[in-house]
Amino acid sequence: MPVARTVLAALSLFMLAGTALAQDDPAGTPTPPSRPPVQQTPTGAGDVPAPEFVASGQPLEIDTHPINPKGVSTADKATLDQIDTYFNNIKFFSGDFLQVGSDGKRVTGKFWVSKPGRMRFDYDPPSALQLLADGTSVAVRNRKLNTQSLYFIKQTPLRFLLAEKLDLIEDSKVLEVGSEQAGISVVLEEGSAASGGKSRIQLTFPAPSYDLKQWTITDPQGYDTTVTISGIDRKLQLPDRIFFIDQQKILK
């Protein structure tokens, strides 16, 4: 099963979840790296995609171009500043997610984020996968097998996405950025001990709201995982206990 991960702040956790997903589906086999085919729509070039296109889980294509972090253009800096402002204005963030792997497998679930540092992703049955961050550690749990893998947040790209304040240029490696009528997008490169190498994360913010709706993660093996989020609630405050990690269940 290809390594898969994610959010927002959850974005990169889906790369940590590959082993647990394979345990959920032991018969699964890797497929060649590829993105799910882009659904054709009747809109003309440059038109804003219909909401149902985004909700379908298909990758939303927004053209991006490489940037030089030491010489970012005024237009590109404005786009990156817009993304920074979006994340920095969020403290509570919850909703539903749809994850589509490079093999076309679709899984759904719910997520909750409380910045700084805390998040939770619960996959819907039959998957037993759960991802937790408690402010210090990140746990990937299989509730059916009662197993758990634990990482320090600093071992994952979550160290900046769950931070109270984000500055993409200072806190990450920005590879590409794009802004067009359909929305804005940024491509980041992240490497960590937890993910086993360097991964690419493309965040997509469709017009007209420019809220985060989708990201695609390309893992160190070249497999793509696309995550689409919906039903967003920015006001729901949750108790810290829902992000609690039971340290006694650590296996590795």
Image (cartoon, rainbow, N blue to C red):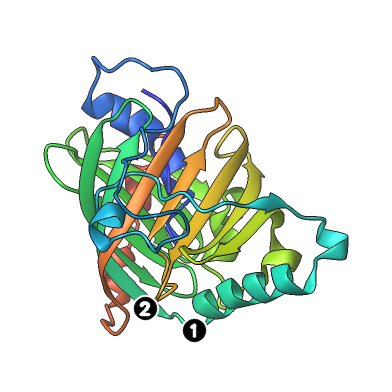
Q: Secondary structure at mark 2?
A: strand
Which residue is found at the position 41% from the left and 44% from the top?
14
State the residue in front, 92 or 66. 66
Q: Quadrant of the N terminus?
A: top left
Q: How many neighbours does mark 2 have within 10 angstroms: few (below 14), some (14-19), or many (20 or more)?
A: some
Which residue is found at the position 32% from the left and 63% from the top?
244
- Kind of residue at disc 1: Asn
Q: How many neighbours does mark 1 have within 10 angstroms: few (below 14), some (14-19), or many (20 or more)?
A: few
The residues tagged by marks 1 and 2 sit, at their Cα atoms, a distance apart of: 9 Å
In the picture of the structure, the residue carrying the numbered disc 2 is: 92
State the residue in front, 139 or 94. 94
Q: Is residue 33 visible?
A: yes
In the picture of the structure, the residue carrying the numbered disc 1 is: 89
State the residue in front, 244 or 21. 21
Q: Quadrant of the C terminus?
A: top left
* 181 shown above or below 6: below
- x and y, in percent, of residue 107 in the image: 22, 41
- x and y, in percent, of residue 198 in the image: 64, 37
Q: Is residue 121 visible?
A: no
